[in-house]
Amino acid sequence: MDIPSIITRTRALLVEHYVFPDVAAKLDAHLAARADHYATATMPEELAGLVTADLQSVNGDRHLRLKHHVNEVPEGDDAASRQHYATEFDESMGGVPLLRRLDGGVAHLELAPLLFPVEMIAESIAAAFTLVSHARALIIDLRRSRGGDPHTVALVCSYLLDEPTHLNTLYTRADESYHQFWSLPHVPGTRFGGAKPVYVLTSGTTFSGAEELSYDLQQLGRATIIGETTGGGAHPRHGFTVHPHLEATIPTARAINPVSGTNWELVGVVPDIDIPADEALDRAHREALVKLGRG
């Protein structure tokens, strides 16, 4: 394991890509000063832990990591993510591991472990929402969802809104651009619509893109969030292979919500009903039945 080369490559990626250049400069100097500390690592997993702790030492960005992978990581940007997507997608029934009807005409829909890229998950989302369109209220379960694609967030929101709606804006460092995400005017399948009750379940491990879905719906007043405060990661990232078992994950953009003017970084999405995650489904079901006049 060529530790100096790994650190040099990680530092260069950080300086080139991190969405906050001033923080990148501080971290670059910090990593350079810690060379002797990293030299004590004997395994890639150990080095990943040491470097990640330092990368997160300035602003606590949980997307900023040197991530260890047990299996070898292919070369190329985001290669590790693509490698894992195929297996996780199949094992999770296309990103929709659970869909069922609860008493009172309430649907329970779980989206996990990721809101996969649209080109992968669109068919699953269309099928799921076509089924739940017949429900009187909907519970979207994100307690086991650890992230996802902002385009997929926009697709899901499109089934819950009646008109095209501005959901989020991403500022990207590379070209200093602002890209708006809107719900879609047309969707495959059938919308749930913008009037019936929606509840979103969260946990302390709900993260990144799954947080965006929760936050966007909360800021629009379209859903009631029930569960635990989420993990607090609002900076989309890219992954870069720096060793056969190590991936530098560098946030390259930041979210700006059109309602709040900010995002959920570090603070997480604070639920409307704060309750332990394992109690959130029962509470959401009760809330839905009361809303429907059946409680």
Image (cartoon, rainbow, N blue to C red):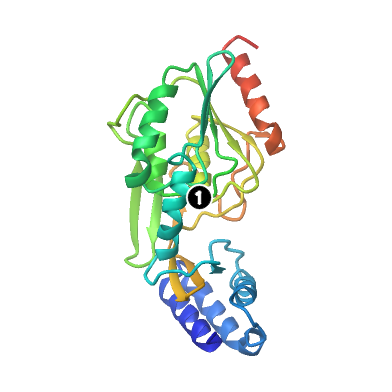
Q: Residue 81: image x %, image y %?
A: 44, 59
Q: Quadrant of the N terminus?
A: bottom right
- The residue drawn where x is 40% and y is 54% is 170
Q: Is the residue 23 above or below the residue 87 in the image?
A: below
Q: Is residue 76 visible to us here? A: yes
Q: Residue 29: image x %, image y %?
A: 56, 84
- The residue drawn where x is 49% and y is 67% is 249
Q: How many marks?
A: 1
Mark 1 is on which residue type? Gly
Foreground: 158 or 173?
A: 158
Badge 1 crowding class, 10 Å Cα cut-off, few under 14, some 14 to 19, many 20 or more, is: many
User: Residue pushed farthest top?
Assistant: 293
Q: Residue 206: image x %, image y %?
A: 58, 46
Q: Residue 121: image x %, image y %?
A: 38, 42
Q: Secondary structure at mark 1?
A: loop
Q: Is residue 115 visible to us here? A: no
Q: Is the residue 85 above or below the residue 281 in the image?
A: below
Q: Which residue is mark 1?
A: 147
- Residue 226 falls in image quadrant: top right
Foreground: 101 or 35?
A: 101
Q: Quick check: 147 left or right of 187? A: right
- Residue 176 falls in image quadrant: bottom left
